[in-house]
Amino acid sequence: HAAWLPPEAFRSLGARRVLVHGDGPLVDTVLDEVARACARYGGRMWHSPSWDVDVDLVLTLRRADALPSSTAQAARAAGEAALIDDGRTLGDEGFLLARAGDVTVVLADAPAGLLYGLFHVVRLCAAAFDPARPPELHRPALRRRMLNHWDNVAVHPVMGQVERGYAGGSIFWRDGRPRGDLARLRAYGRLLAASGINAISVNNVNVARAEARLLTDRLGDVAEIADVLRLYGIRVHLSVTFAAPVALGGLSTADPADEAVRAWWAATTRAVYERIPDFGGYVVKADSEGQPGPFTYGRDHADGANLLAEALAPHGGVVHWRAFVYDHHQDWRDRSTDRARAAYDHFTPLDGRFRTNVVLQVKFGPVDFQVREPVSPVLAALPATRVAVEFQVTQEYTGQQRHICHLGPWWSEVLRFAPWGPGGRTIADVATGEKGEGGGLVAVANTGDDPFWTGHPLAQANLYTFGRLAWDPRLDPRAVLDEWMTLTFPPSATADPELVRRTLHEIMDDSWRTYERYTAPLGVGFMVHPGDHYGPDVDGYEYSRWGTYHFADRDGVGVDRSRASGTGFAGQYPPYWADVYESPERCPDELLLFFHHVSYTHVLHSGSTVIQHIYDTHFAGVEEVEAMRRRWQTLNGMIDPAVYVRVAERLDEQVRSAIEWRDQINTYFLRKSGVPDAHGRRIY
Ligand code: GCW
């Protein structure tokens, strides 16, 4: 399945006369794309002609040698139209799109910019050739736009080939070996580049024996992937184990203060760069859920991260050090420990101690990728550290790609959140950095060897949206969804493109909020089946070691995280939000149970009581999913039958599952509280 790059998406480009000017591997990729489009749709392509040709589109590097005079003129005119003077650079990845006479010009200073410019032309379709189109300058807000694959090389006995993967096997690995499907890998790189992603890690952050060896004797397997993805401007990163000097190097310790350990990392990293000169760097999950880390040696996370950063620095690499550190052996009886506090408590004392090529990679919320959480206070608490925001495109807690849950609005809300108070700097600003030196955006991938790439065909939109928001966090998620639809369901592939688009919007726009309505209420989180995290189990984690509790009793529900009487987590925010979250009266409804334990009859800002809100949203959530299914049925016969059937089957499961959620949650709270539904609906 071609996802958002079906051949039809190239129709308007492929029917035109196109000139490409420039050299190098990425320019070859551009040439290849244009040549294929032109071969299909009757257009024509020239590569760096030294004479003048009449064309509709010019894609050129500004400083390319020997531009024929008309190309040079067009480039200059385009630059002038966009008020770009010769001194101003478009950056490594930026491009300019402007009309010069009756030619559309894409201008870049580096080959990657040409590639992104090409995909922009594809996205715009005919609009790219509109004579009245004003000039546009595009540069990514974030330098690194990264995907983390939680793919295992060898099949893990519990987690399988891909941890939290809902799209079949891995694109890279199968049963301990590289998959070797380079054509598919290339198609993947192409999709990622067209969404704006430029970095990828190719193995799970939980690093077992086989995966650890990618760093040393199995480096060739990684180099093979890097060789393909490089053609699309994507740099490869590796997840490594902190214990590598012991596990692979035969040393007796992995202590960051040990000279032999430092020498081992330096030599090992040098060997990586000899093989993969543009290698991106390391991703590390240390002292987290059983992974080894610096704590074993009485060192802290700055010591640990700096050890790897020092080895990477001479080669220009970065270490993504994850902040997902908490006690996963908590005693549920212990009310003083709060998992939500952990990352802040561990990392804020270290601010200022990390080397400049360390990026602290922070999950967007303080707990774990729930459908609703407050934004992690860690993101606003380390001004002297480069910080990246981590999202989860794979839908571990949001329906596992059996449910439609379009996450664009949620990520956009997080990126627009202003942790120092309304009007102040946003999370997107933190990820960007004051001078572009921020840590960027990272997401856990949702792709696999499934024919539709993502299991649920509509889950492709989440990956596309992540890439686009990483390129420009200010984009309107609804407009991005629209781009995705237009590319994925082009006119020639459907009977009535307008109807398809409208219907898809009706189904997807609000699907994240729908998912929230029928699952755990008011920000309390979890209530999922332990282990696989699919489907409802209200008390599944209540008496477990994982630190995710809701504390429901006969009178009320929620976690008191206030400073006054609770765990004090609310106090980790800068003053504006610390005060808002501290107060049950001011706390936003959707986060009330994350911050407070309140009675069932507590009245929300919405005017409803907590208990009535629970009933109402759960009945409404199921009705919305039923409506989604009816709407989808109206598309039968209008789109690719394989896509139609796959989505229809999954919608049946989503309806079944939403009903299960509704009935378990409502029944649980009716039994706990004894408060009947004001509308007398059936609760069991
Ligand atoms: O959400 C949890 C997942 C684990 C995962 C962990 C993490 C890779 O349930 O499967 O491990 O997060 O982010 O490290």
Image (cartoon, helix red, strand yellow):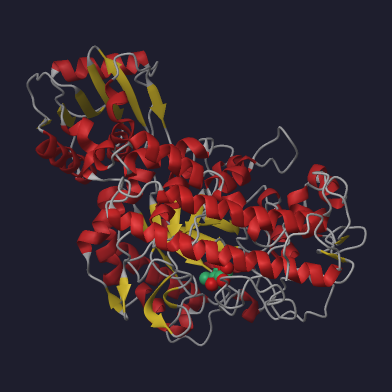
In-front residue for pair 648/84: 648
In-front residue for pair 179/637: 637
In-front residue for pair 339/432: 339
625 shown above or below 539: above
Q: Is residue 595 visible?
A: no
Taking the image in four quarters, ligand 1 sits in the one at bottom right
Q: Position of residue 671 (x, y in %)?
A: 81, 72
Q: Is residue 251 visible?
A: yes
Q: Position of residue 363 (x, y in %)?
A: 60, 58
Left or right: where does residue 403 sit relative to residue 581?
A: left
In-front residue for pair 175/681: 681
Left or right: where does residue 356 sit relative to residue 266?
A: right
Q: Residue at x 30, y 53 (%)?
A: 189
Q: Residue at x 64, y 69 (%)?
A: 325
54 shown above or below 37: above
Q: Quadrant of the image for the C terminus?
A: bottom right
Q: Position of residue 331 (x, y in %)?
A: 77, 81
Q: Residue furthest top?
A: 101
